[in-house]
Amino acid sequence: MLGYITEHLAETGKYFTFVGETLRSIIERPYRPGRIISEMEHLGVNSITVIFLSGCAIGMIFALQMVSLLQPFQAEIGTGAAVAVALAREFAPIITTLMLIAKNGSAMAAEIGTMRVTEQIDALESMSVSPVHYLVVPRVIASICIFPALTMLANIVGVIGAYVVSTKLYGIDSASYLDYMFDVLSPLDVHIGLIKASIMGFMVSTICCYFGMNTKAGAKGVGNGATRAVVVSSVSILVADYILATLIMIILS
């Protein structure tokens, strides 16, 4: 048991050392904007469809549940406000991050892991090119920028999906629905979700790149590294979301 704990503490220490090296490399030249834009296209543009569908589905499902809960109290008009605030603060960043972990996080870890086991990273080091600066930094910067943008997309399509369900399926008055929703929803709610998304983007990219950089030799090692990256990223962002929500509540109270 003690050996298990010691091993995981050592792994955690190595990860934070990797994070420190990544942060230091961000401000070092050359900046490679072309690689950053390429990663942003890969992470963002190619993920629009999955975020659109998942965000819309979450908004519609949440609206169905909220209407059924509020109907006995004749308070269906509050459905839009409840969905919008919940999406902005919690559901949109969480769902977006989980979808991107499944789609891009595993690929990120597997790609870098394959480069490790095929000695491409060793070749970069032999040419005096920092693997962290060349491979990790563009992915981290792209994730910090793209995660909030896709979270905003999930917010918009989720609210639209909830509006369609509430007004077309349950016949809630459209004007009253929107008026109450915009009265309750504040820019602060949206900003909180976007800040969470940026932090989660940094966490996901660094965790996945860390496991990719530390992949063991062989195809099995690449698969294990990608699997561990997905599991650790998913659990970490859920824990981080709770911690961030608690800190925000303390700050705003």
Image (spheres, rainbow, N blue to C red):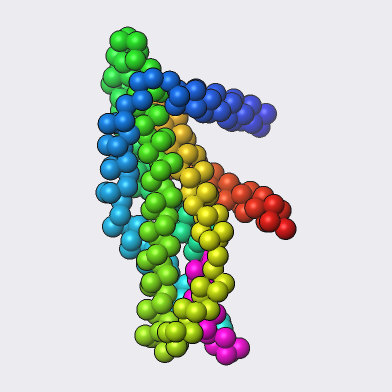
Residue 4 lies, in percent from the top left, at: 61, 30
Residue appearing at x 42%, y 89% in the figure: 171
> How many numbered discs?
0
Q: Nearer the viewer, residue 248 or 113?
A: 248
Q: Is residue 59 left or right of residue 111?
A: right
Residue 31's quadrant in the figure?
A: top left
Main SS of the magenta part reads helix
Residues drawn in magenta? 71-86
Residue appearing at x 37%, y 85% in the figure: 168
Q: Nearer the viewer, residue 57 or 88?
A: 88
In the rendered image, residue 74 lying in the magenta stretch gets the answer yes
Q: Is residue 84 left or right of residue 222?
A: right
Quarter of the image where the C terminus is located: bottom right
Q: Nearer the viewer, residue 160 or 53?
A: 160
Residue appearing at x 32%, y 41% in the figure: 40
- Asked if 9 appears above or below 244 in the picture, the reply is above
- Asked if 189 appears above or below 164 in the picture, the reply is above
Q: Is residue 209 visible?
A: yes
Residue appearing at x 44%, y 26% in the figure: 26
Residue 225 lies, in percent from the top left, at: 41, 33
In the rendered image, residue 81 lying in the magenta stretch gets the answer yes
Q: Is residue 225 visible?
A: no
Residue 47 lies, in percent from the top left, at: 31, 51
Q: Is residue 175 left or right of residue 47?
A: right
Residue 130's quadrant in the figure?
A: top left
Quarter of the image where the N terminus is located: top right
